[in-house]
């Protein structure tokens, strides 16, 4: 096949058109790849920046609340503030109040109840003279084990019991958690 050339010796066949087009496509491809490569670290950085927002609601795990000797031996409930390191969106606060529990001795065991009412989140009070807990907001009533003891109580479940461990002989450790109000079952938040 004959190859044609102009006065300057340039070829005018199909081969003369391809290199510029390939060059353009190659540049376009490089731009796209470069842009995508640049977006990956931006996405990773944004995820790292936003991650603390997801940490705020994490379980605090077991927290030392008090000593066994601080609990009445007659089984009367006693209220304790729970303190732990607390992490919000971007900061950690050491040894900060994060809630409260009622603790009571039951034989050799300890029962821990979150003070927050499972109905709508008010703080349940100990009505020692009446031998029960009562919520001032809508009159839910609970026995000293935290069970609903009045059919007219609007609370859909018992007070939220928390896991307890006795460590080192007399340290009372509690797994402090909150649960969604208004549900029949305990759903941790
Ligand atoms: S919040 Fe306790 S009874 Fe409604």
Image (tube, helix red, strand yellow):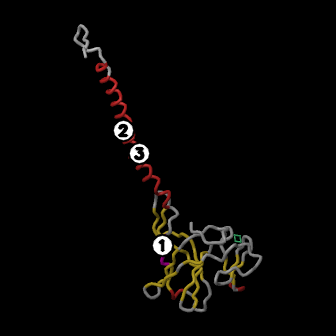
**Relative to 181, residue 23 above or below:** above
Mark drawn on residue 25: none
**Percent from the top left, x then y, of residue 143?**
68, 83
List the single residue furthest toward the left.
Answer: 9
**Mark 3 neighbour class, 10 Å CA radius: few under 14, some 14 to 19, many 20 or more:** few
Region rendered in magenta:
60-64
Name the front one of labels 3 and 2.
2
Q: Label 2 belongs to which residue?
A: 33
**Mark 1 neighbour class, 10 Å CA radius: few under 14, some 14 to 19, many 20 or more:** few
List the single residue furthest toward the front.
Answer: 1
**Mark 2 neighbour class, 10 Å CA radius: few under 14, some 14 to 19, many 20 or more:** few
Magenta stretch, overall SS: strand
Q: Quadrant of the N terminus?
A: top left
**Percent from the top left, x then y, of residue 24?**
35, 27
| Most foreground residue, 185 or 23 | 23
Is 98 magenta? The answer is no
**Relative to 13, residue 181 above or below:** below
Is 61 magenta? The answer is yes
| Most foreground residue, 102 or 140 | 140
């Amino acid at each position: 096949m004959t190859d044609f050339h102009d006065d300057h010796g340039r070829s005018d066949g199909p081969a003369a058109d391809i290199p510029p087009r390939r060059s353009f496509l190659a540049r376009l491809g490089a731009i796209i790849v470069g842009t995508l490569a640049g977006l990956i670290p931006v996405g990773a950085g944004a995820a790292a920046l936003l991650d603390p927002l997801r940490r705020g609601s994490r379980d605090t795990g077991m927290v030392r609340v008090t000593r066994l000797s601080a609990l009445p031996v007659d089984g009367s409930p006693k209220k304790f503030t729970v303190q732990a390191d607390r992490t919000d969106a971007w900061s950690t606060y050491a040894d900060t109040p994060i809630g409260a529990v009622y603790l009571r001795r039951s034989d050799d065991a300890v029962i821990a109840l979150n003070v927050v009412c499972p109905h709508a989140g008010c703080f349940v009070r100990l009505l020692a003279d009446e031998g029960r807990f009562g919520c001032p907001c809508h009159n839910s009533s609970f026995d000293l084990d935290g069970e609903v003891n009045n059919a007219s109580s609007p609370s859909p479940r018992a007070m939220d019991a928390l896991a307890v461990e006795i460590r080192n002989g007399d340290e009372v450790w509690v797994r402090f958690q909150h649960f969604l109000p208004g549900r029949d079952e305990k759903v941790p938040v």
